[in-house]
Amino acid sequence: MNSQLIVKNIQSLSKMCPLEKIQMYDQELVIGIKPSLLCDILVFLKYHTLYQFNILTCITGVDYPNNKYRFKLVYDLLSIRYNTRLRVKTFTHELFGVNSCAHLYFTAGWYECEI
């Protein structure tokens, strides 16, 4: 499955669930979501037959101290079946946490400890 087909599938996904942003950077798809929907969207992306993002390659945290939602979390996913990468971005601040996705991806526990 090429990246254009994945983009079409993600656009249809945006009709079903509220995605804040859809972008393409150098053949990599990036979606922005609300932190409260993170685990639900990760479950969907992992188990749906059109996506199958079974591997979490990295979780990155960025601090923007001057912003209202100062922490950006970026989840990098890989679909081996379709040879496609996806970045899932969300923003939060120090008073509200983000639910763990360690029950979905074994590597998430390690990455979350490092953030």
Image (spheres, helix red, strand yellow):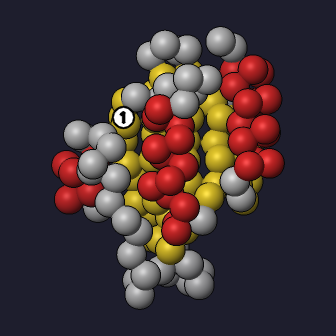
Percent across and percent down for residue 11 are 79, 39
Percent across and percent down for residue 37 are 54, 61
In the shown orientation, is residue 44 left or right of residue 13?
A: left
Residue at horizontal 50%, vertical 53%?
Answer: 40
Residue at horizontal 47%, vertical 32%?
Answer: 47
Residue at horizontal 40%, vertical 28%?
Answer: 54
Q: Quadrant of residue 99?
A: bottom left
Residue 81 makes an appearance in the image: yes
In the shown orientation, is residue 83 left or right of residue 5?
A: left
Q: Amino acid at mark 1?
A: Thr
Percent across and percent down for residue 31 are 65, 47
In the shown orientation, is residue 107 left or right of residue 98?
A: left
User: If the image is split into quadrants, where does the C terminus sit?
Assistant: bottom left
Helix, strand or loop status at disc 1: strand
User: If the image is split into quadrants, where does the N terminus sit?
Assistant: top right
Residue at horizontal 37%, vertical 49%?
Answer: 59
> Circle 1 sits on which residue?
57
